[in-house]
Image (cartoon, rainbow, N blue to C red):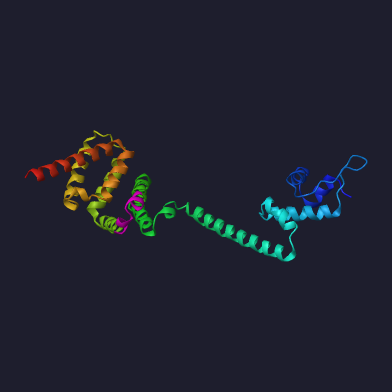
Amino acid sequence: MLTISQLAASAGVTVRTVRHYHHVGLLPEPERDASGYRRYSAQAAVDLIRIRTLADAGVPLARIDALLHAQPAEFAAAVTAIDVELQRKIDQLTEHRRRVAQLAGGEGLVLPPEVVAILNRMRGLGVSERMVRLERDVWILMQALDPQSMRQGIRDKNASFDDPETTRLYLVCDQSLDWDPHDPRVDRLIDELDAWEMEHRPDSSERGNVGLIFSRIAEASPAWQRIVDVIVHRAEQRRTAGHDS
């Protein structure tokens, strides 16, 4: 006969665990003997080992009691079902691990490879990591709000980096993030960007990706808040003048 400590040790659990199994009705609690101790049989040790094994396998305690009293065929079927469920969880965790591993690359977790390639191309051109992150945010927004425009946006962005003058202008935009809003260079950049907009997107209502970029950068830079305000104002003036004429 075993004391509760010996019983717990035989199954590799704590005395507290044994008492919990008593409390939930999984393991019968014997009466005290003449000396005031509870003594457990070898069968209790076997039952406790079975309970612990099932619990360690992820079987809810509420199901363990039924399994302990099941017929062999019923028990085998239940174990098979448990194994299928465990495999499902393993597959799910494996997928979670794969996705978490992608966090090292950040962009690849939420953006298609073509966009990740653009972000890496920007890094190769010398664009700051700060600007790359802002650009990444724009693509995330576009994918969520207007996924149909992604393919065209990818083509447009690659084409813009194929053009040396547009690339130069983009690098200046990168440098301007930390300029004072009233720095004379901001005025010159406004003129250049406004001219670029009129040449490449004369219809300001179709700014699309460019508008998202402008808005996202403006959130991170006082200089860019002024740049966006002025460019939007100029576009509005041109549109008004066009309607009046």
Q: Is residue 190 left or right of residue 179?
A: left
Q: Is residue 36 left or right of residue 179?
A: right
Q: Residue 79 in magenta?
A: no
- Residue drawn at x 52%, y 58% as measured from the top left: 95
**Magenta residues (range):** 141-151
| Nearer-the-camera pick, 15 or 216 | 15
Q: Position of residue 167 (x, y in %)?
A: 26, 52
Q: Is residue 111 left or right of residue 151?
A: right
- Residue drawn at x 78%, y 49% as measured from the top left: 27
- Residue drawn at x 75%, y 45% as measured from the top left: 17
Main SS, magenta region, reads helix
Q: Is residue 91 left or right of residue 121?
A: right
Q: Position of residue 191 (x, y in %)?
A: 18, 42
**In the image as oriented, which residue stretches furthest toward the right?**
34
Q: Quadrant of residue 5?
A: top right
Relative to 160, residue 5 above or below: above
Q: Position of residue 218 (x, y in %)?
A: 30, 40
